[in-house]
Amino acid sequence: MTDSLAADNLLAADLEHILTHTRPLWESLRGQRIFVTGGTGFFGRWLLESFAHANRMLSLDARMVVLSRDPEAFARKAPHLARDSAFGFVRGDVRNFTAADVSDKSFGFMVHAATEASAKLNAEDPQQMRETIVDGTRAALEFAVAKGVRRFLLTSSGAVYGPPPSTMTHVPEDFFPSRECGESETVYGEGKREAEALCAHFHQEHGIEPLIARCFAFVGPFLPLDAHFAIGNFIRDALAGGPIQVGGDGTPLRSYLYASDLMIWLWTILFRGAALRPYNVGSAHDLSIAQLAGMVSEVLGGEVVIAREPDPERAPMRYVPSNMRAISELQ
């Protein structure tokens, strides 16, 4: 079996997995239109692929319109989606697009997934990072109001919680740490907090139903291997022949949810979630960065090199969600 055929078979199995666990939900989209921002990134590509599969298999006669800065580039990456008559692509920047840019008169649903989750951008141009998140969310919400959107899904982030205490194994949705004045925060996490606040404002002023998915860490096809995602970097290193480089001491604890399960939760939250009730989306099974590198090494080969020894006096940092709210309320 060629690598390309194996990848196609994997994707087909993943899409069927998503449909199996969301089949009844798609009736809400029958004959409807849905608008998506960020449709060409990791989240977006999976949203498009899973929508196309459900639309075809269930004969939903639904339409998805996607905002993209470069529709032609996306068409070269995913020609089967670009050719699908169920899709329309609109050129524009999430920070300043308007309802006038889109010919469709109305949409029942919207997914706002356009955010540059880039550590490099956060460090080099935090203002652009903030504008993309906050101004982009405002523009998306204004578009939603103008187009009559009823259900609006914001892909927020676990970064809104900031660093949890070392004694907290899994971060729940009601955790908000107290902070000293002037304590440093990432622009990304604070931007997502502002985006959630904008959703609350538009709910009160316009009656739109915002759904909040606080997303953690993920893995699967279409994940960039050259961004700041540790698992992507480890896979990249292994595919290049190694070594697999761990930049720190390997002790931070993370969890990784597979992309098809991510889609199950996002579609479920869009169709069944309670407005303005945030849901953590991620795996509750934690492992250290060193363990993660070791797992990649076992599968793909390559020596693991850890930059420095752990400090035995320092508790490992954790970034692991509690997912009990979603499990108890939405399953």
Image (cartoon, rainbow, N blue to C red):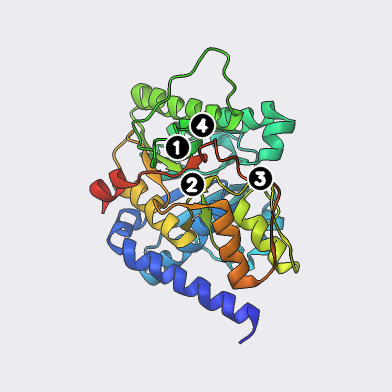
Amino acid type of the residue tagged 2 in the rendering: Phe
Which numbered disc flags the more N-terminal residue, 2 or 3?
A: 2
Camera-side residue: 115 or 280?
280
* Distance of label 4 from label 1 (alpha carbons): 23 Å
**Residue farthest toward the bottom in the current orientation of the protein:** 1
Near mark 1 (Cα within 10 A), the count class, few <14, some 14-19 or many ≥20, is many
Q: Which residue is mark 2?
A: 35
* Distance of label 1 from label 3 (alpha carbons): 47 Å
Kindly report which numbered mark, 4 or 3, lies closer to the viewer in this rendering. Answer: 3
Near mark 2 (Cα within 10 A), the count class, few <14, some 14-19 or many ≥20, is many
Q: Which residue is mark 3?
A: 248
Camera-side residue: 270 or 317?
317
* Contact flag, marks 4 and 1 (Cβ < 8 Å): no
Kindly report which numbered mark, 1 or 2, lies closer to the viewer in this rendering. Answer: 2
Q: Position of residue 263 (x, y in %)?
A: 43, 56
Amino acid type of the residue tagged 1 in the rendering: Lys
Which numbered disc flags the more N-terminal residue, 4 or 3?
A: 4
Q: Position of residue 233 (x, y in %)?
A: 67, 56
Q: Secondary structure at mark 2?
A: strand
State the residue at coordinates (37%, 66%).
19
Kindly report which numbered mark, 4 or 2, lies closer to the viewer in this rendering. Answer: 4
Amino acid type of the residue tagged 3 in the rendering: Gly
Q: Which residue is mark 1?
A: 147
Quick check: 109 left or right of 137?
left
State the residue at coordinates (46%, 69%).
14
Q: Residue 192: which disc? A: 4
* Contact flag, marks 1 and 2 (Cβ < 8 Å): yes
Which numbered disc flags the more N-terminal residue, 1 or 2?
A: 2
Where's the N terminus, which quadrant? bottom right
* Contact flag, marks 4 and 2 (Cβ < 8 Å): no
